[in-house]
Every structure is written in C-alpha cells, then in structure tokens.
Image (cartoon, rainbow, N blue to C red):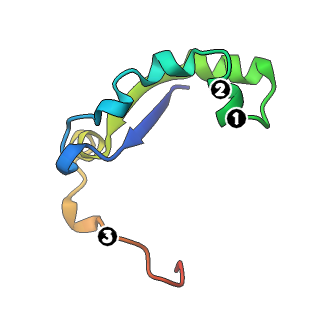
Amino acid sequence: MIGLMIVEGENGGHTLPSAYLNYRSSLESSTALLEFLPHRSNEERAAILRAFAGVTTWRAVMDALHVPDAVLIDRLPEDGA
C-alpha cells in the first residue's frame, strides 16, 4: 500500500504549489502527524508515514490514468447530491 496526497496544481496544471514542495519533511516532524491524525496510534502514524509516497497534482493523476476532462465537475451541487 502507498499513500499520496493529491492537490490542485498551480493554474490547474502539473506544478505543485510551493506550500507542498517540502510536505514530506514537514510530515516527519514530531507533531505534524499527531496534528493531522490524532485518532491514530503512534504505530499507525509511523506506518502511514512509511507508506507515504509523496504529493502529486490532480492533473498528473488525470493524465496518468487517461481520464478525460469532460468527467470533471466544477463543484458539487448545493444540496451535496
């Protein structure tokens, strides 16, 4: 199992926003995973960090999986349906 954080790229593209460039190293701080995953045990947080492969963009995922843009929606309807 691997884990990815998928974020919106700059201008909807492949470029990661600068806030995410050092995301893995910030996760490795002693308090970051505790803050993000307070409901997990120390052992579970360590396993999650070991499986974390990095950060990518939605555009990169869409392109890699050949998902057409036509399936995307701008936002969910107000009623959440």
**Residue pointed to by mark 1:** 37
Q: Residue 73 carries which label?
A: 3
**Residue pointed to by mark 2:** 33
Q: Amino acid type of disc 2?
A: Leu
Name the element at disc 1. loop
Rendered position, 4 above or below 28: below
Q: Earlier in the sequence, mark 2 or mark 3?
A: 2
Rendered position, 39 above or below 29: below
Q: Are marks 2 and 3 in contact (CB under 8 Å)?
A: no
- Mark 1–mark 2 distance (CA, rounded to whole Å): 6 Å
Q: Name the residue at 53% across, 84% down.
A: 79
Q: Are marks 1 and 2 in contact (CB under 8 Å)?
A: yes
Q: Quadrant of residue 68?
A: bottom left
Q: Name the residue at 44% across, 81% down.
A: 77
Rendered position, 71 above or below 17: below
Q: Name the residue at 22% across, 44% down.
A: 10
Q: Quadrant of residue 45?
A: top right
